[in-house]
Image: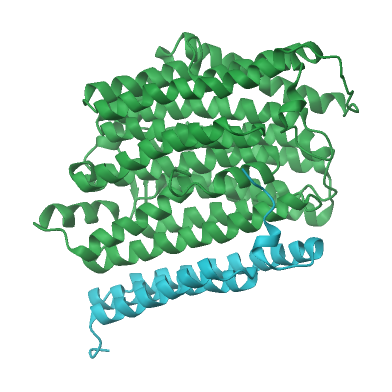
Chain colours: A cyan, B green
Amino acid sequence: MNGISMEAGLLLAAILFALGLMGLLMRRNIIFMLVSVEIMLNAAGLAFIVAGMRWAQPDGQVMFIFILTMAAAEVSVGLALILQLYHQLKTLDSDAASRMRG
Amino acid sequence: MVLDDFLHLMPLLILVMGSLITMLVIAVKRYHKIIYIITMLSLIAAFASLFEIGIGEPYHISPLFIVDGFAIFYIGLILLSSLVVAMLSYAYFEQREERKEEYYILHILATLGACVMVISKHFGALFLGLEVLSVSLYGLVAYLRTRERSDEAGIKYLILAAMSSAFLLFGMALVYAMSGSMGFYEIGLYLAASQQVPLILIVGFGLMVVGIGFKLGVVPFHMWTPDVYEGAPAPVTAFIATVSKGGMVAVLIRFFMQTNGFNYPTMILIFTIIAIASMFAGNILALMQNNVKRILAYSSIAHLGYILVAFLAGNAMGIEAVTFYLVAYFITSLGAFGIITLLSDEERDAEQMEDYRGLLWRRPWTAAAFTAMLLSLAGIPLTAGFVGKFFVLAAGVRTELWLLVVMLALNSVIGLYYYIKIVAVMFSQTNVGHERQALHPSAYLVSGGTIALLAILLIYVGVYPAGLMQLIEALIISIYAPVM
């Protein structure tokens, strides 16, 4: 893995993160918003691995496994909520689902 | 792990045991009262076990955790608030959801997450605590499945909290990439050693501020607060307002103390802007609301701004003021949301202004307690809120943060208006009295007793703050102890 510099790795992670953020802000479908959040979390995981590689420590990969676990828990709760929301509203459009104002 | 490690982690271990036992008991038989008693017992046992931990030297369970007086105080605060929320929850859920037992598992786990955050001194531990807290909160916010706004609040909180976690994690990764360590103290050493802070590190800290700011619900990361406060069940709202935010404040203080964050003008500038924006946005937006839960949500944004003023003072007095203010704010918020819980009926929470019209004539004691809570939020003398605000102002004046102090005084005046508005509605004469169906009397006794206790505590701390202040001074001092 000597061929890749840390800056390049972090740049890749940053691009992924930005893509996820853009997706989150632009998409109106709640499932796609959830997917975008996952991309952002995985970008953070990638950044941790790159950082761990620079210092030749396992800490980065440990954090990545934590992030994976957490993301899985989050998605399972999220999908359950989306299912519930769909039963009530028959839509996955986040604008239609937003009724609280003020 | 040696025996001493277990002893110092005892409160957390008891909470873990509590949640496991709850889960097993539910598998055998669903019985609300027993689950409730187990929850209460495990919270009380966890609190009692705090007294077993000496507050001498800070105890490192390296490299992740540190148990010191500061941590013990905040864990105690979190456990007591969680206990109060649990006491309020029983009557609330007894009349609503059919499957109410799982609420208590999530409740204990969320408390556990906040406790882990308080004792963390490493990014890994901070992340674990934060996520245990957040994932439990997703479930809690959306717990009342039959109410449509519950789902909406749940999904909004989930997406935004996950996004803020991603920001926090990416920031942590960048900081780690530069400093080569994830412990707070080691990062502080790296910062002190480097002449010029590298750009990537600054970006990393910036991203972390987004994540932390979101959890605290400060401007400009406050968008979720009113919606989640409105949509979540009233006891859960009380939990978010106190335990979740209190845990994050504790982490913020520890992080800044161990990394010497107060020496960096950029950080101070960012937090100054956040504090001023939070005070103004919170108070001005609260003026336009008609929903009591939303008013309290915006007021919580403003109160976090006040707390940041004391936090920015950055010295011993500032940290003590933050802690005192937090205690006063916890008592008040728990009381206010407790009364909303008490007045709510099966279909919806008592959140409209109209629900409170003429409350004084229908239920004089409840109205009196609510008035006391609102006056404390506004910072009227003889209440805990006033003393808290006084300490915050004193800390600001001592360190000559004149801009922040003036803004705080100005905002207190704006804030007074909407608190008094609710009080005025409660005192107005009316003859529309709708009787609510009586719940089991003992359930009301518990909730009512809790509210009465909080009201007495509120006045007591307001009249005689010295006792609490001595306790804070004795315990908080450990945050300055040299860390290894």
Q: At x 77% / y 16%, what residue is drawn? A: B358
Instruction: Residue B428 in the image: state x and y as whole percent.
Output: 73, 13
Q: At x 50% / y 9%, what residue is drawn? A: B382
Instruction: Residue B373 in the image: state x and y as whole percent.
Output: 59, 20
Of all residues shown, which one is farthest toward the left?
B195
Q: Quadrant of residue B276?
A: top left
Q: Is residue B324 visible?
A: yes
| B167 sits left or right of B106 in the view | left
Quadrant occupied by the N terminus of chain B: bottom left
Of all residues shown, which one is farthest toward the front?
B288
Q: Nearer the viewer, residue B17 or B479?
A: B479
Instruction: Residue B478 in the image: state x and y as whole percent.
Output: 30, 34
Q: Is residue B52 visible?
A: no
| B132 sits left or right of B262 in the view | right
Q: Quadrant of residue A33?
A: bottom right
Q: Nearer the viewer, residue B41 or B114?
A: B114
Indicate whether A66 appears above or below B214: below
Instruction: Residue A2 in the image: state x and y as whole percent.
Output: 23, 89
Indicate whether B116 appears above or below B41: below
Q: At x 59% / y 43%, what residue is drawn? A: B226
Q: At x 51% / y 14%, what residue is drawn? A: B383
Indicate whether B441 appears above or below B20: above
Q: Quadrant of residue B320?
A: top left
Number of marks in the rendered image: 0
| B440 sits left or right of B359 in the view | right
